[in-house]
Amino acid sequence: MKSTRIYIFALLLVALASCSKKFEDLQINPNRPTSVPASLILTKQLNDLAGGLGGVEPWGAVARYNQYYCRNYQYYGDNAYSWSNGPFGVYTAQLKNIMQMEDEAKKSGAKDINPYASVAKFLKAYYFYHLTSLMGDVPMTEAIKGTTGIFAPKYDDQKAVFVQVLKWLEEANTEFATYTIVDAFPAGVDIYYGNDFTKWRKLVNSFKLRVLVALSKHENDADLKVKQRFSETIAAPASFPIFTGMGDNLRYVYNATINRYPFNPSNFGFDALRLNMAEAYVKACTQINDPRVLVTCDPAWKIATDNGYSLTDFRSFVGAPIGQNQSQMEADAIAGRISMINRYRYYRTFTAEDFIIVGYPEMCFNIAEGIARGWASGNVNTWYQNGIRASVNFYGIVNGNNTAYYLRSGSPTNLADYTSASFTYSESNYMTQTSVQLEGNLSADLSKIVTQKYIAMFQNSGWEPYFNFRRTGFPTLTGGVGIGNGGVLPKRWAYATAEQNVNNANWKAALTKQGFNNDDLNGLMWLIK
């Protein structure tokens, strides 16, 4: 009897152990991956460069803040600079995943220095450059450290962020030089450069020039070494290769199936009359007889007709002040008193034009500015004209006869009903205009260089047009009742509103340190002082 009891008890123990094991097994989902290949994360992060950061894609919100175009129909949105909730989502949507990509590459056996880590350095430099340029001091060294118990990160000084950005870029340049074809990413992952690591080097160095020019107000800072870094970058192409043409651009290419251009035949009818051109861009072009306005905008039909102007007469192109009352803007648009976007160019296909994230024309103008400032030796006029020429060519404008296409007046929603008009472009005549030619005077030349950069970055380069305006005052961007913020163009984004709740002490400390009484959109950050 005793042995029977022992036997039964033993059976119960075995059964309990078996049940416990099965219960634990139920906690594991065999269909849920415990890791993600670094290559998949990289593909997603490279695609993310074509958007985000408040809407950097073509015809996104940022292009409106850059005063390239306006909304004239209030029901579907206004022209306000609503900068009350800064883009802290970058920390979780991009930076966290970039760090995971680095970890996954190491887990798969990669060395400490590997292509994933090098691309990660560029991506981190890119995002932290934008975060700090948009808001000021931002969390960096303690950011995304929740696994180590840091849930309320301190804010790093803006200068410290720029020091780190430059360090990442210089390390990436050195590392990319060591890779060969055996280090290539899997096929289809590198959507920009197809495993051409030399082009990645050109990108990080050309982007570094953007960062250095952004630091122009601190050109004499001993820690940043702006002049020295700028000079050595353009003087030593073997050590610091930079873009040599449009083929080196960091550009996002749209297709007709999955990644369509933001404007295309499928949304033409919805937006055909609701978006018009902004005065800042149109005037920047027409004041210097710039042919790019003839292919990016439609003429203001009533202005052209009433005055007997040809469709490619620069006087036929008129933009609306972005701060204008929206009801008046809508009335002017319907009446044909202001130019609409060139709907033939931007709506007719699903691919329109490539989105240039970091481009050769911008780099040329950055080099021209640095030389004009005395940071390096070189021919400022050559770089300036190279930038203009590359941008004009981007639009298919040739020396000689050209044809522009416009939606016909009286048929605003019929994309098939368009007309054509011819114009002649002479590069020599354009370049030698007093309004275009450089003068050898920094103040005058800076205005021309930055204005040309602004025109070249139309629907490209994200925030750079606004950052350049904020830094130099060129070209003229205007305020008014329609932009909010008391009609004044803001200088910065406020921090994410969630920071007031989840990181209040550090949020307050950052504001106090920067001299802001509150999270002020008009406060001057260190970068522009």
Image (tube, helix red, strand yellow):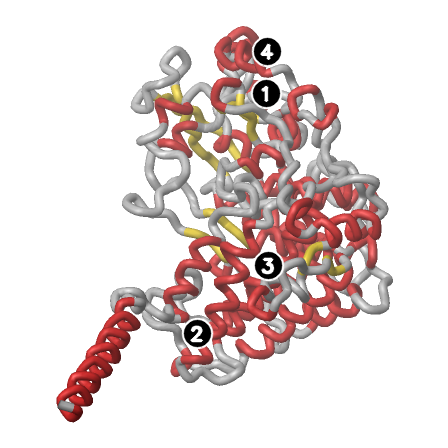
Q: Name the amino acid, label 2.
A: Glu
Disc 4 designates what residue?
328
Q: 111 left or right of 414?
A: right
In front of the other: label 3 or label 1? 3
Residue drawn 76% across the image and 56% down it: 215
CA separation, marks 1 and 2?
53 Å
Q: Name the amino acid, label 4.
A: Gln
Disc 1 designates what residue?
318
Disc 2 designates what residue?
104
How busy is the neighbourhood of tag 2: few (under 14 within 10 Å), some, or many (20 plus)?
A: some
Q: Of label 2 and label 3, which has the lower sequence position?
A: 2
Whether the residues at callouts 3 and 1 have beta carbons within 8 Å, the answer is: no
Residue drawn 59% across the image and 51% down it: 361
How busy is the neighbourhood of tag 1: few (under 14 within 10 Å), some, or many (20 plus)?
A: many
Disc 3 designates what residue?
126
Q: 74 left or right of 171?
A: left
